[in-house]
Image (cartoon, rainbow, N blue to C red):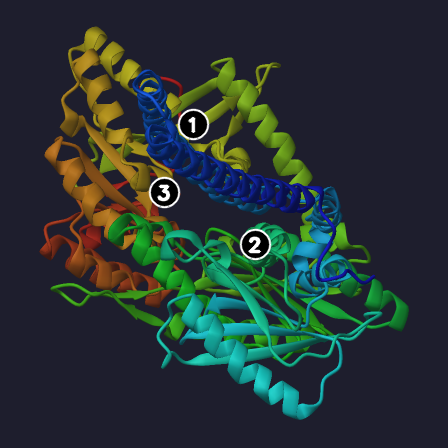
Amino acid sequence: MDFPTKRPSQLKSLHIHSIRTLTELLEAQNRTQTFERGIIDLAIREVGKLAERLPILADNHAAKAEVAGYARRCKTIAASLTLLNQQQGKDAHNNCRKISSLITETHELLRRMELTLIDKSLFERQSAVLENIILSHEKVTQWKEFVQEILLEFHGFFPFNFFSIAFTGASGISIYLYYLGQYDEQTKIFVRKRLADNLLAELKIPADTLVELEEFFITDIKQQRDFEEIETITVGVPDEKVGVGGILGVSYSSGYRLTTQEQSIIRSLLSVMVMVVGSSKTLSRTLQELAYYAEHDPLTGLHNRRYFNEILEYEFDRACRHNDQFALLSMDLDNFKGVNDGFGHMVGDQVLIHLGQLLKKQLRKGDVLVRLGGDEFAVLLPGADDHSALIIAESLRQAVHDFEFEVDGPYREHISLTTSIGVATFPKDAPVVADLLAGVDLALYQAKSAGKNFVFPLRSLETGIAQNKKMLGLSEVLKKALKEERIVPYFQPIMACASGELHAYEALARLATEDGEIIPAGVFIDAADKYGISLNLDHVMLRKVTAFMAEQYAETGQMPTVFVNLTPQEIQRRDILQYAENLCRQQRIPPEKLVFEVTEREAIGDLSNMRKFLSNLREKGFAFALDDFGSGYNSFHYLRDLHFEYVKIDGAFISNIMESKVDSVLIENLNRLCQQLGMKTLAEFVESEEIMARLREIGVDYAQGFHLGLPRERFL
């Protein structure tokens, strides 16, 4: 489509007609003024001459007197004509001046109207361009191609040669240069320099600014104009501020002259282009970020759970088609909550970031590491069998074990962690994805149960699923029992070895079924831990134990000492102590009569929180017992760092004391060490008088077991 450089215009015709008519009127006024002045001047001269000759023509006295009168009248007429001539001259001058002024004003008015009023065809051409500027997801994601589409439409209604866009770049200015048509290399060299310099100058950007130029060629046009001079229109971002998407401005370059109206329309279109291009670039970047974070964890940059589910389905289909195998690893950091609680979540986040990069380095190319959330990770190992999966899992466990994060601060503290890893392989361990996921989670749970910092392969999926179903059933039974107040404490006596006298009781949880059967804690405690019921169980037990203690005191006048078991989560929450303090206040129980008991493995696994917990516990007047002492691989190290009122020696040593000289020697030395550190020792699993006699001989302080008394509903 081609458009002429000048169009006929009714406004322009009116302009020419008006100026021509007023000019003709001014010329007529000048001619009339000249003609009238000539006639009057002639009349004045002739009347003057007549007035001078009349007295000479009179031949008698009477005639002379009459002629003199005519002469005076002629002079009066001449004077009046002179005055008339002067007045008409003034009026004619004023009229000419007004007509001249009217010509000037009419010209200026019509010129301004030409600048303001635009032909209907120009509006139609502008609308045709704007109709094609429609943002969509496809166009925004490929915004550079979208710009080319707009320019092609633009060119169809307002032909031009070049178009350029300026953006802020990482180190300077980026200019995108679009060629509308095909040009030889010499022309391109000229255009690159000329347009870049013009664009920088128009946008008031220093000429020495570093410019990165990217070129695009739009050759799919029907007509191309040759040019000698380039007429450029540049529109920048208002107020010299960087616009949306970093856009600075756009420039339209044409090889033919534009009318005033066309320039006005094109400027308005360029203003729209500034907004559209800037918005498209910003939306494109935003959509790319959204697409990235839809599949990546924003903290560590690793893939997330959504991507894991997709890639797992893909790998499952691939393995089925090619009769291949793959493995899954499920990882969980041991006691990571202690890092967040002890050092803050910012430090915890930094640890996770470093660990993510550390784990990636241990994997093969093609392996997929995923952060599922919190401190949970998963790894997909394409093509891996169970043997290679265990090797990779062990390398990950060892890398975490050797990892040491240094915390900035006055004391330069260090954070060390361990991880537990479950391993399952397809198709050996499970034939479908759902079972494989259940299996690898079960393997992780078994690794945690084994003492943490372990790699645990899935042993039997069917057995594991059956156990899970059983535990789930137990958890539902336990929840209902808690709601119906069917969790009751049973009390097992703790005796002084030397005197044989009653020293205290340990409160053990029991579940009373709807049929009246009593189920010991060993049956349901794992289900309580796995399904998050332990905290409620602790609170119910503590409430009922303190109530029994108050009843005992009311009946006998004696307040027994009672050991109460806590779950490890209570050490992290620390609100159990406030709850216990309130109960003691209500029941009028001295705090020293309550001894809180936590197993060694769980207590020491969160050492930083353990210190805070013990400090808070002793401030409130309570005592503490470390259960199953000796089961940990570094038990004596904890005796150096922490102080306990009671140390309960692991029952596995006690039950073998008569058959194993090693166990006997260990107990003897452990007992001596604890007593020298000011801690009382308590032996569990005392099942015979022979064992009790040996404990007295060694000098153990206290003992409990079936030989000394079974758990009962009431105190002795």
Q: Judging from the image, what secondary structure is the residue with disc 2 in?
A: helix
Q: Nearer the viewer, mark 3 or mark 2?
A: 2
Mark number displayed over residue 537 = 1
The residue carrying mark 3 is 568
Residue 483: x percent and y percent? 50, 16
Q: Are marks 3 and 2 in contact (CB under 8 Å)?
A: no
Check the image and name the residue furthest to the front. Answer: 60
Locate the N terminus and report the quarter of the image it occupies. bottom right
Viewer-proximal residue among 153 and 263: 263
Q: Are marks 2 and 1 in contact (CB under 8 Å)?
A: no
Q: Which amino acid type is shown beneath numbered disc 1?
A: Leu
Locate the C terminus and report the quarter of the image it occupies. top left
Count of picture labels: 3
Viewer-proximal residue among 393 and 219: 219
The CA distance from mark 3 to mark 2 is 71 Å
The CA distance from mark 3 to mark 1 is 13 Å
The residue carrying mark 2 is 267
Residue at coordinates 18% horizontally, 53% vertically from top-left?
A: 642
Mark number displayed over residue 52 = none
Q: Is residue 211 above or below residue 52?
A: below
Q: Quadrant of residue 684?
A: top left
